Amino acid sequence: MLDYLSAVVSGWGDTGFAEMFSYFVKTDGQYCPASGKEIVGFEWIIGNATNAITMTGKIYDPYGVAVHTKAALAKNATTLEQLPTTGDIPIICAGCKVGFTPSGDSGVIHITGQVRVFYKE
């Protein structure tokens, strides 16, 4: 069975574009499971913005270390990222969070960033 965790970040103003964070919440509203699951991919969902900008998404472990990064995420678009079956698979657990950094000011329409982390149950 495939399930996902989701985190949404929003709140950039007309002039600010520093990295903002959100903790992962399971789809039923509970915090993500602490036990390691096999992460199979990500769905990066970036909202629209007035200005021509991109986003960088980072996933952090509970200690604040970036364990996965996806750059150049287009505004008003969804980017699917399938992870390889071998190699470093990030562990998503309680205390993990996502950070998004716009490449510049979003303008009048304030941009949002969301990531869905798909894992095998």
Image (cartoon, rainbow, N blue to C red):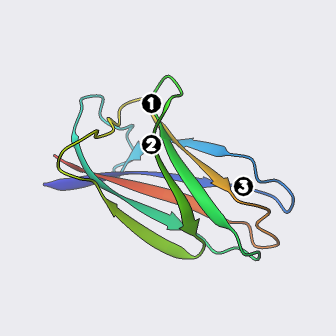
Residue that label 2 marks: 24
Badge 3 crowding class, 10 Å Cα cut-off, few under 14, some 14 to 19, many 20 or more, is few
* SS under mark 3: loop
Report how far apart the C-alphas of labels 1 and 2 lie in the structure.
11 Å
Q: Position of residue 112 (x, y in %)?
A: 62, 62
Q: Amino acid at mark 2?
A: Phe
* SS under mark 1: loop
Front in this rendered view, residue 32 or 75: 75
Q: Is residue 13 left or right of residue 23?
A: right
Residue that label 1 marks: 61
Q: Position of residue 78 (x, y in %)?
A: 46, 72
Residue that label 3 marks: 11
- x 58%, y 76%: residue: 76
- x 45%, y 30%: residue: 61
Q: Amino acid at mark 3?
A: Gly
Q: Is residue 59 above or below residue 102?
A: above
Badge 1 crowding class, 10 Å Cα cut-off, few under 14, some 14 to 19, many 20 or more, is some
- x 85%, y 63%: residue: 14
Of callouts 3 and 2, which one flags the residue occurring earlier in the amino acid sequence? 3
